[in-house]
Amino acid sequence: MSSANHLGEVYNTLSKRFLDSKVVDIQPAHGDPPEQYTVTFHLPGKKSDEQGGVSEAGEHKIEISLPFGFPKFPPKCKPLTPIFHPDFATGSVAVDRYWEKNSNLPDLIVHLAEMINCQHYSTDGDAYNPRAAEWYKEHAAEFPLAIIDWARGSLLGEGDDGDSEIQLDDELELTLEDDGELGIAADLSFDVDDEQLGLELEAADEDDGKVFFPFSNAEEEREHAERVRYYTAVKDRREFMRLKRELEGQIEFREMYAETMRILQNADRYYAKAKSCEKQGQNDKALELYQKTYEEVADYPAIRTDITRLEELTGGSEEKEEDKEKVGKKRDLRSIRVQTKGMGAVAGAGGSSVDSKPLPPPPPPRRRGFNRKLLFPLAALAVLVIGVLVIGSFFRDRGNMAEAERMLKQCGSSLEVASYKEAERFCQQGRAAAKKAVLFGGGRKGEIIGEFDTLLSSEEMQNGLAGRVVIDGRLYSAAQAKLVLQLKKRLEQAKEAYEDKRYGEAAKYFGSVRTLSQKVNYLDEKAKADVSSKYDYSMVKQDMLLIESRREAKKWQGMLAAVEDAQKRVPRLPSADCEALRVELAGCKVEANLGLIGQKMEKQINDGNWEEPAEEYKKAGTLAQNYMRDGKSGTIIYKEQLREIKQILLRASLYKEIDEANSAFASGHWDEAIASYGKSIELINDPEYALLDTEQTRKNNELLKKLILKASITKSEESV
């Protein structure tokens, strides 16, 4: 497992990232600091019931375990609740390819949430769940299931009060600014019905470009002008709120909001990394990240100051100011403001709602008249509408171009695995999406349409759609082409593992190549022979590793079986490798047999059979003598094994002598007892094959000598 410090950093990062999230709940499951987490996702996803039906669930759990070597090796993700998804299996989730691109655990958790939300899924042959892959392809138009606002940690449309309408936050706000000249009051009342409002606004009339105010004094004229301004502001305000509600209900607005949140999240990540690099003294890297932040959001707080400071530290900037301004105009998405004159006080001091405090009733109607200044608010309203339409078009075109780029990648992936009908469908969908980008497609629109046209008209695509595929200058059917591509991939993996001496993997891949080469005619006879030879060599080397592990564990029967398997493959190897392996395996077989003899002798001793170990010892000596080679490493091993076997034999002899001595002592055969105890002392003190440690040997010597003395005394007493 990774170090405790690193695990602690991972835990702190996860806690900060998802502290206030309503979508993701992370709980440590094992270890301190944790090396296993239970992650609960509160968002819609698909599940399958026992009858095979697909339904929607709102809560999903995944167990994430950090393996030894993390983050070099990806986390193990195991679903704890049923999740119906192409990349989800009963006990695992396909995250390896994502981890190769981004080995960041918080980002992986975000990716898992988006997978459950049906934003990411496989539809090719690598899918863990083929049935789910087919189902997802058929229902692709229904995805994603929800829009996740990662900045707020909730699903888009989820307010604190349960209101399902979209709530605009500080990141995306529509503000109204006052027209100081008109001086409209801070709060506008809506206590005027539409009929009264229409009558009041008809109170002004234009005649030949002149405005007549037949009032008795200037005070009446001022009151009338103020009344006209009042009702005009009410009308403009109502029209604005109507447009705002209409905009919030459109799918384009939801997509625009989600895209804005994504851009802001990217900017936040770049800025945080830049600050970290600057603290570590990596000024060049920090400057690069600040510039990326600027490219994402041009009015990011203090970003220009940060860039200027770093440019001074690193010796200047190579980017011209006018280039920055161009990028800024393109990415200035932090605050989208729609301005209109005469309506700025709607936000109100202190953030009051639009319907908070009604004004006192307006003054009674006066005489008819017209205020030419009505033209300006109406023009501002037109600007508002145009602005909303332009913003909607921008994000709609941006989404279409992103979809086209995604379809281009999908098309390329399908071509790689010879799925030509699928590739054609992706190309057509991507081309159609690019053509929908009417205003903001830019030069990339023409380029990507051209790329789609090139792919659709390519010889490979045309042959593939016709059921023919050209690979390495040879024509195959579509089914054969898939087998050939799979064979080539396995052959490349096998060669790489073989060169790295990962013989277990090499044997697996070479075996797969041999099987595939029987189904499709791609390899010539020489290549097939080379594959078979390397397969056998890899299997032998794998057997040697197995032999070594069983030798260390003294599993002699298993070692002997592995040796015999390897010996069957050796004759199929090249002669240069064959002789050396044959000799080595012959020695391993001797070791295994000697080990089995030793085990058998131990069992005989435990069963009280003192005579039989001597016969087994003779077999061991004969076996070792036949295979001993002077100057070879095996000689030392055999001598050591023979020494161990001889120790077993000496123990058998010792137990036999002691048993005979005890029997003679009990029967009163004192001379036999004394002789047997004396032989036991000789065996215990054998200098080459010492059976016991020094202290135990001393104690046993004393005991045996006492028995000899006792037998001698008893014998003398009986003879008197």
Image: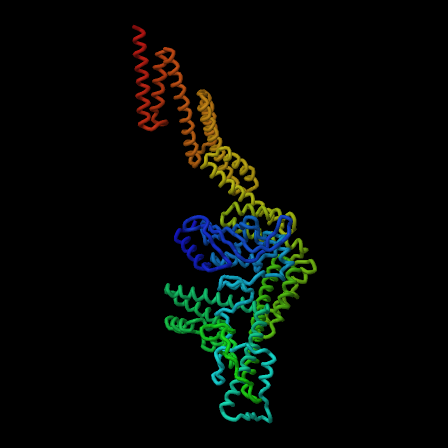
Give x and y (percent) for residue 507.
55, 45
Give x and y (percent) for residue 551.
46, 36
The residue lying toward the viewer, choosing from 143 and 70, is 143
Is 2 placed above or below 169 here?
Answer: above
The answer to whether residue 484 shows anywhere in this view is no
Is 293 placed above or below 370 here?
Answer: above
The answer to whether residue 27 shows anywhere in this view is yes
The residue lying toward the viewer, choosing from 619 and 683, is 683
Task: Classify residue 302 as left or right of residue 262.
Answer: left
What residue occupies the far top of the structure in this picture?
Answer: 720
Give x and y (percent) for residue 707.
32, 17
How many numbered marks does the figure carry? 0
What residue occupies the far right of the structure in this picture?
Answer: 466
- Residue 138 occupies quadrant: bottom right
Q: Quadrant of the C terminus?
A: top left
Q: How is the image coloured?
A: rainbow
Give x and y (percent) for residue 517.
63, 49
Task: Classify residue 268 as left or right of residue 537.
Answer: left
Task: Classify residue 566 as left or right of residue 423.
Answer: left
Residue visible at 64% across and 68% down?
432
Residue visible at 46% across and 60% down?
20
- Residue 418 occupies quadrant: bottom right
Is 515 placed above or below 234 here?
Answer: above
Residue visible at 48% across and 33% down?
556
The residue lying toward the viewer, choosing from 335 and 470, is 335
